[in-house]
Image: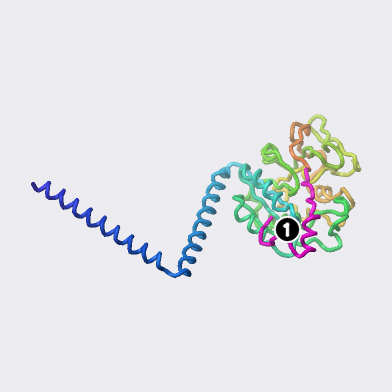
Amino acid sequence: MVRLLSLKKLLLVYFVMSTGALLWLILNFGLFCHGSSKEEKTLLTKTKELRHWEERLRRRERDLQKKPQEDASLPTIYAIMPTHTRHVQKAELTRLAQTFLHVKNFHWILVEDSDSQTDLVTKFLATCGIKHTHLNIKTPEDYQLKETDPNWLKPRGVEQRNVGLQWLRENLDVGRDKGVVYFADDDNTYSLQLFDEMRHTRGVSVWPVGLVGGMRFERPVVEHGKVVRWYTYWRPERPFAIDMAGFAVNLQLILENPQAKFELRVRRGYLESSLLEHLVTMDELEPLADNCTKVLVWHTRTEKPKMKQENYLIQAGRPSDPRIEV
C-alpha cells in the first residue's frame, strides 16, 4: 500500500512539473511573439553570432585533429618564409598550410615584406593550426622590384630571411634547442618526403630543385657520396650554384655563426653563396634525395591573375566589395 502511494505521489509530482513547464513555455512564447521588433532583431543577431563562433570552434577542433602530434625525440624544422601582399597571397599560404599541417615539429616563421603586419596574414595564421612566428620588415625602396621587372633582376626576400635568422638567434639557445633551418618560399610546392629527409641535417644538406633556372631541374652532382659540381645553366662556377629551396642548415650552425646572413648587395645568383660561405665548404655538404637524383621541391609559381574586368568596374565606380577577403 505504501509503495502504491509513493508511485501516485511520483506521478502527481511529474504531472504538476510538466504542466508548469508547459505553462511557462506558453507564457514566454506569448511574450516573445508580442515583443518589440527591436528585441526580436537583437535576439536573431545574437543567435547568428553564437552559430558563427560555434562553427569556428568546430573548424578549429578539426584543424587540431589533423595536425600531427609533436614528437619530443625529433628536431624541429624552422621554415623561414618571406611573403608579400598580392592577389594570390592568401591562396598560396592556404595551399602551403595544408602541406605543413602534415609535418611534425614544424615552426613556420612567416615574414611579411611590409612596414607592419597585415590583417590578412594575422588572421590567416591565427586559424591555420600551425605553430608560427609572425614578423615583418620592408625591403629598401632601391631593391624593390617594379611591376614590369623580371624576378631575377634584384635579390628578393633578403631582409625578410635575415630578420628570421635574427629571431632564431634571439629566441633559441645553442645548448638547448635542436632543429634545422629551411628557407622556404610561398610560391613553391613541397613533397612531405623532403621534410623527413632534411630533419636530421648535421651541417648543411642539399638536393635538387625542379622547374627552376629555365631548366627541368638544377642539382648538385654527387660522386662517391660527395658534391663535386653543380648541374645548372647559369654560372655553374659559383661557390654554391644552388637555389634557395635546395638546402637546409642545422640550427646549431646558424646559432654559432652570428655573422652568417644573406647579403643585399650581391651579384645575380650569388645570394645563397653569401650565406653558405660562412657555414660550410662544398666537401662538407650532405647530399639527400637519393644522392641528389630525386626532385622533392618545385618552383611552381601560381599564375598572376588578370584583373582587366576588375579594373573596368573600378573605373565605372562599381568596384568589388573590399570587405570580402580573397
x then y, percent, for residue 317 = 76, 65
The main secondary structure of the magenta stretch is loop
> What's the residue type where badge 1 is placed?
Glu
Q: Quadrant of residue 243?
A: top right
* Residue identifier under label 1: 112
Give the camera-side residue of 195 and 192.
Answer: 192
Crowd around label 1: few <14 · some 14–19 · many ≥20 (10 Å): many
Q: Is residue 96 above or below residue 321?
A: above
Q: Please name the residue shown 68% across and 53% down the image.
A: 109
Q: Quadrant of residue 294?
A: top right
Give the camera-side residue of 253 and 320.
Answer: 320
Left or right of 50? Residue 317 is right
x then y, percent, for residue 204 = 75, 43
Q: Please name the residue shown 68% across and 36% down the image.
A: 193
x then y, percent, for residue 87 = 75, 54
Give the camera-side residue of 312 and 220.
Answer: 312
x then y, percent, for residue 185 = 75, 48
> Mark 1: which secondary structure?
strand
Left or right of 28? Residue 181 is right
Colour basis: rainbow
Q: Please name the residue shown 72% across and 53% down the image.
A: 89
Left or right of 66? Residue 147 is right
Q: Quadrant of the C terminus?
A: bottom right
Q: Quadrant of residue 242?
A: top right
Residue 311 lies in the magenta stretch: yes
Give the camera-side residue of 134 and 317.
Answer: 317
Give the residues in magenta: 300-326
